[in-house]
């Protein structure tokens, strides 16, 4: 169970970072291709740090639920890899794409095998496989997030899911195209419904920092049981570092130096293996779909603390 501490070495640091973010002139723009997200105020900002034992520190809007979007892809990958093991890698690659998260361009000349599990095409493959194994991929994800965060109230925002579905032609195209190569097992409409529900789960910085803890504990869940091998946790952290922020992954590694995963809801999770996990939220995005204030805050965190994988 999480402890909400008010003073610790992390707490003054978080206040310092929040004050710096407050004075930032450039905050980006909320995602507008999902109308339900477009109304978010780019001046909102929250940040949470969770230690390995579940102690969590936060600042600003750190308890405010927001749309997890592509941050959810880390957890579906973890759940499927834990259940399926290495056969997953016959269906999705592990290389940075260098392309936007929703790009179709590589899929045809790479025979329907997406470059990595974090671009939309790869995430659709992972969700499809998790759905085959569990019968309810989004439900399995929600159950996992609730257990790890200790927040039984986590839920799908049905309005956001409906909005994604209504504007989901590109994801539908990706799904059908991969199905034509035999790389999708479920009917594409079933897969899309699961994927949109997965992306529309609302959670706060505190919830997501806690839920990411297994990656800092080398595969061990909040209750002390093991989700995956130490090696698999390392693999997911490595893919987050190289692919977690799409065509900005090089810049993110340069500035932040941690495995991280962004979503167009403005959230970013990050891992300091063996030490702590972070989640930041700022709804203003840069042109590559990553939170402007979120990346800046993580950049400041690793600079000020020296906590990095490098
Ligand atoms: O597939 C989509 O368009 C969204 N549900 C998720 C995209 C997303 O968050 C990309 N990340 N930056």
Image: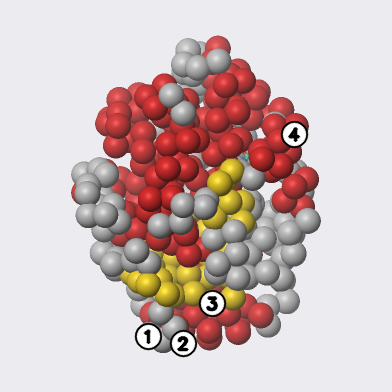
Up/down of 145 relative to 161, above or below: below
Q: Quadrant of the N terminus?
A: bottom left
User: Which quadrant of the frame does ligand 1 lie within?
Assistant: top right
Query: Where does label 2 land, which residue?
Result: 12
Residue at the spot 47% in from the left edge and 43% down from the top edge: 142
Tell me which label, 4 or 1, sits earlier in the chain: 1
Expressed as whole percent of the image width and height from the top left, the position of residue 173 reads 65, 23
Residue at the spot 35% in from the left edge and 50% down from the top edge: 238
Mark 2 and mark 4: span between their CA atoms? Answer: 42 Å
Q: Who is closer to the viewer here, 96 or 127?
A: 127
Are circles 1 and 2 on residues that touch, CB within 8 Å? yes
Query: Where does label 4 land, which residue?
Result: 167
Tell me which label, 3 or 2, sits earlier in the chain: 2
Describe residue 33's horizontal placement relative to residue 228 as left or right. right
Mark 4 and mark 1: span between their CA atoms? Answer: 44 Å
Q: Who is closer to the viewer here, 221 or 287?
A: 221
Query: Where does label 1 land, which residue?
Result: 9
Query: Where does label 3 land, which residue?
Result: 59
Q: Quadrant of residue 94?
A: top left
Mark 3 and mark 2: span between their CA atoms? Answer: 10 Å
Expressed as whole percent of the image width and height from the top left, the position of residue 75 reads 42, 44
Expressed as whole percent of the image width and height from the top left, the position of residue 225 reads 22, 49
């Amino acid at each position: 169970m999480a402890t909400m501490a008010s003073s610790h070495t992390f707490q003054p640091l978080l206040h310092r970072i929040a004050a710096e973010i407050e004075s930032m002139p450039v905050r980006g723009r909320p995602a507008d291709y999902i109308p339900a997200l477009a109304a978010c105020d780019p001046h909102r900002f929250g940040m949470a740090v969770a230690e390995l034992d579940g102690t969590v520190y936060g600042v600003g809007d750190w308890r405010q639920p927001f749309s997890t979007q592509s941050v959810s892809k880390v957890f579906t990958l973890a759940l499927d890899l834990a259940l399926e093991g290495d056969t997953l890698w016959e269906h999705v690659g592990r290389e940075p794409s260098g392309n936007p998260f929703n790009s179709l361009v590589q899929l045809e000349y790479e025979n329907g095998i997406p470059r990595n599990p974090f671009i939309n095409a790869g995430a659709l493959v992972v969700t499809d496989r998790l759905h085959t194994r569990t019968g309810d991929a989004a439900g399995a994800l929600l159950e996992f997030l609730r257990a790890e965060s200790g927040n039984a109230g986590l839920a799908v925002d049905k309005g956001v899911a409906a909005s994604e579905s209504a504007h989901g032609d590109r994801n539908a195209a990706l799904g059908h195209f991969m199905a034509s190569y035999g790389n999708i097992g479920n009917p594409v409409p079933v897969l899309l419904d699961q994927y949109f529900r997965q992306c529309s789960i609302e959670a706060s910085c505190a919830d997501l920092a806690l839920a990411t803890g297994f990656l800092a504990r080398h595969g061990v869940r909040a209750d002390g049981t093991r989700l995956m091998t130490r090696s698999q946790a390392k693999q997911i952290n490595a893919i987050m570092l190289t692919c977690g922020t799409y065509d900005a992954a090089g810049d993110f590694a340069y500035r932040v130096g941690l495995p991280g995963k962004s979503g167009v809801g403005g959230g970013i999770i990050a891992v300091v293996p063996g030490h702590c996990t972070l989640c930041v939220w700022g709804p203003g995005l840069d042109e590559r779909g990553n939170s402007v204030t979120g990346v800046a805050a993580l950049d400041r965190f690793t600079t000020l603390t020296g906590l990095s994988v490098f």
